[in-house]
Image: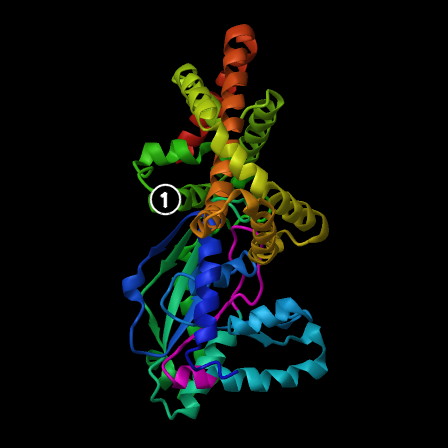
Amino acid sequence: MKYEKWSLGYWLFKQYVRFVDRIIHHKVILNGEAHIPKSKPILFAPNHQNALSDPMAILLHTRFQPVWLARADIFKPGIITFLLRIMKIMPVYRMRDGKDQLAKNEKTFADSIKVLENNCALALFPEAAHSAKRQMLSHKKAVPRIVFQAEEKAENNLDIHIVPTGIYYSSYWKFNRSVLVNFEKPILVNDFLQAYRENPSTAILALRDALEKAIEPLTLNIKSKANYESFELIRSIYGKAFARKTGQQKDFISCFQSDQHLVRKLDELETTNNEKTDQICKAAKSYDANVRKHGLRSWLVEEPGSNFLKLGLNKLILVITLPFFAFGFVFNALPFFAIDIVVRKKVKDFAFWSTFSLVLGFTLFPIVYLLELWAVSAWLPLWWHKLLFFASLPFAGKLAFRWYILLLKTIGRGRLFFLKSFKKQQWQKLKNQQEQLFDELNKIS
């Protein structure tokens, strides 16, 4: 495969996977697309937290056919490697893959340089590993080395633009999640070429540090190691209230920026007042445990005022839409739950859950849909009836999932109504606990 060439097979496969990806996600938002140059060799440099989902977030939703460099150990024999190569993902070998494997990187780097020489898009994770956390790992030297090597080979005539990119997920693996992809103004390799000619090692470090500095504002980066889980819990409990307080609850991008502000405040608190940090973390854990003991979620406790009206409205919607749920559930439950069970039991690395769900999803669902079409075809005499039935299945499945989520929320509202009506003391204790926690958090933010 000539990675630098436009591929019809890639384009066709991309359309199919993009459709599957749209079904999986609630929304995919691209922010800052105007920063991506149109007629320059580009290197996308995103943060890396969610295995194959990270390159998919870029390659499926931009006009390019970017060539990705990824760790070699994900290239397992069989369909995974086949699909990775179709999607123009090339292996990069590390010392842990075996010293004898490192020589294979020469071909990968040579192909990467060809991509840049042809004004195409290359993509590489500066961290060289995924964290499966809302944390950015230290950057490695691979990006600067590749772009400087490419410029050297082309006698400094490429004018490579490195596009800092940040990817944020509302959830790393849950179905119907939202994704935000932030693009920033390119870093021009030309600005570092003189320094590279004078001292290559210093220039490589300077470009690495400049890239890391440019990417961090595009991500949600909880720097704390000791209190990471607690800060993530506080963000999930208090994030919406903080966004309202700062006037940043309008859309997904604003909420992301609000979360950035909140975690910065928490990181600062840990640095300046460790004792206060411990108190707030313990209070958050205690409150969360109490909320879950009653079978609730914190958002229900936070806004209980309109609960009775919404409870009645939700029940009405559930009853009216029950036939649509039944249709979607019957024809989607088998592959959906089969994939979920297999991924949870067999995939040990949490960061790969969404990857395997995507790959199994676009493989298994069409097979099941075709079998179901065959099973009901006798009741669908006209060809367009069959086509309509087949085309409706993925949308019906997503509708069934959203019906199920509404059911869970309705059950939660029912529990809240019972707690407020028949266990008033426990409800008041829970509400007081929430207000005390929020008062403490309001002081630091």
Residue at horizontal 36%, vertical 89%?
A: 156
Front position in the image: 332 or 272: 332
Q: Would residue 418 be visible to someone looking at this image?
A: yes
Quadrant of the snapshot with the C terminus: top left
Left or right of 145 in this view: 182: left
Dominant secondary structure (helix, strand or loop) of the stretch shown in magenta: loop
Left or right of 307 in this view: 361: right
Residue 391, position in %: x, y? 46, 50
Q: Amino acid at mark 1?
A: Phe
Residue 373, position in %: x, y? 56, 49
Vertical position of residue 28 compared to residue 431: above or below:
below
Taking the magenta stretch, the answer to whether it contains residue 137 is yes
Magenta stretch, residue numbers: 113-139
Q: How is the image coloured?
A: rainbow
Residue 438, position in %: x, y? 44, 27
Q: Would residue 47 be visible to someone looking at this image?
A: no
Taking the magenta stretch, the answer to whether it contains residue 297 is no
**Which residue is label 1 attached to?**
252
Residue 272, position in %: x, y? 48, 42
Vertical position of residue 276 compared to residue 88: above or below:
above
